[in-house]
Amino acid sequence: MRTQVAIIGAGPAGLLLGQLLHKHGIDNIILERQTADYVLSRVRAGVIEQVTMGLLDEAGVGARMHKDGLVHDGVQICVDGVRHRISFKELTGKAVMVYGQTEITKDLMDGRAAVGAPTVYAADDVALHDIFSGAPRVTYRGDSKSHEIDCDFIAGCDGFHGISRKSAPPRAITAHERIYPLGWLGILSDTPPVSEELIYVRHDRGFALCSMRSPTRSRYYIQCSLADDIDSWPDERFWEALRPRLDEEGRERLVTGPSIEKSIAPLRSFVAEPMRFGRLFLAGDAAHIVPPTGAKGLNLAASDVRYLSQAFIEHYADKSDSGLDHYSDRALARVWKAERFSWWMTTTLHRISENPFDLKLQVAELDYLFRSTAAATAFAENYVGLPY
Ligand code: FAD
Ligand code: DHB
């Protein structure tokens, strides 16, 4: 087989890249380790920046998001039982969209099927070869047979645990990492959300987040220990841990019910530099991870894909490699700002340290955020997404 761009991974980064390239007549094949059903069963992101919405529109897959997504003009932050609101609209003129990653993935998969672009699911033993030559190759196993794809470029969109980053020479990579000593326990339930807007909660008992997928479906998270396993968190225990972290109105309005999904996610900050190795380009979680506080992961994957798709388009249409040469620097400049914001939200809202100095700093940070229009504007600018 031969293609122009071989894409590893059918998460949001790989699928969006494939769709944008196809629109510009650039041939691509996606190789995904899991089945399509498995990819669709992973409940993850929920908040989409305006620039990400724009990209989904550009890729021709935004219609259902505009119909079913919920536009949020602001966010609430509850500190030790007192709620504050930050208005994105007043401070930045922008808004975010609450629309699940599962739905975006489905829209992208449907869009790809509609144009007949190839995706190989359940591709085993994907391996990258000759990435520093002019003729890279990808091999994999599928249907009990070995396959080989010759290509011009490889896009590594295979997430944090994928093979692409590991295929770069170790000496060529610098990894920056911070691991937080806690995780997020999340549940999805068919109960009405406690509030029309998201509530991020800082409480002495630990962080919580009240989010949603629709007016009848809620998504809640609480901070948990990394040693916890899902079986030690029956639904009752989850609701009992969440309720006291809310303010009085939240406690009264909280509707509990059986969970339809429950999972634990570790919190990590990670950046691998650079994001290009010869003809291999990394995008999304393959190159960087943010802790989920601040909802930046999927949005960063989309912004990488914007830079990368434009660079490929320039290469094929204008015969210019300037975009490819600047890809890593451009993407990383935006990545580090999102890393900073996600790190700040995580350390300010979670119970991480028992050191009274750290706890006093958290309260001071938040007090400043609520009293200063400059601080609130900086927060809102970052939350709705920095411009490209
Ligand atoms: P992935 O979604 O990880 O996709 C990579 C794909 O590659 C996968 O399908 C995987 O199966 C495949 N793959 C892996 N290895 C191989 C291989 N060897 N061969 C072939 N295929 C392979 N982000 C936000 O922006 N907003 C939020 O609100 C938000 N909330 C989150 C909440 C939680 C609880 C979690 C866990 C994450 C959240 N994120 C959020 C982060 C977001 O989900 C990720 O950043 C996003 O999925 C990254 O997309 P990706 O395509 O780069 O990687
Ligand atoms: C959701 C996830 C996040 O990480 C976040 O910051 C906000 C919302 C969610 O899954 O709805």
Image (cartoon, rainbow, N blue to C red):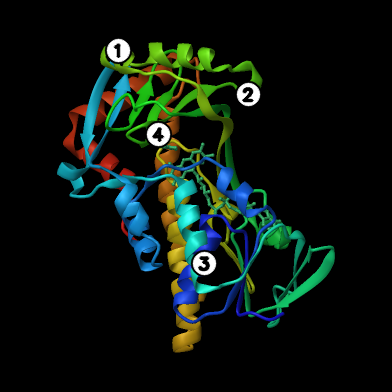
Residue hosting label 1: 252
Quadrant (top left/top right/bottom left/bottom right) for the C terminus:
bottom left
Q: Residue type at mark 3?
A: Arg
Judging by the rendered image, the residue that carries numbered circle 3 is: 112
**How many badges with numbers are in the image?**
4
Residue highlighted by disc 2:
230
Check whether the beta carbons of the residues at disc 3 and disc 1 lie within 8 A of each other: no
Which numbered disc flags the more N-terminal residue, 2 or 4?
A: 2
Work out how far the residue at label 3 is from the one at label 2, CA to CA, in angstroms: 35 Å
Q: Label 3, label 1: how many angstroms apart (C-alpha)?
A: 45 Å
| Numbered label attached to residue 345 | 4
Q: CA distance from mark 3 to mark 4?
A: 35 Å
| Residue type for callout 1 | Glu
Local SS, label 2: helix
Whether label 2 touches label 1, CB < 8 Å: no
Crowd tier of the residue under label 1, counting other residues whose Cα lies within 10 Å: few below 14, some 14–19, many 20 or above:
few
* Marks 3 & 2, CB-CB < 8 Å contact: no
Using the numbered discs, state the Cα–Cα distance from disc 2 to disc 1 in whole angstroms. 27 Å
Badge 3 element: helix
First in sequence: mark 3 or mark 2? 3
Mark 4 C-beta to ligand 2 under 8 Å: yes
For marks 4 and 1, give the CA distance. Answer: 26 Å
Residue shown at the point (58%, 31%) measured from the top left: 263
Q: Earlier in the sequence, mark 4 or mark 1?
A: 1
Vertical side of 138 occupied by 62: above or below: above
Q: Nearer the viewer, mark 3 or mark 2?
A: 3
Residue 185 shows in the view:
no
- In which image quadrant can residue 310 be found? bottom left
- Residue mark closest to the camera, 2 vs 4: 2
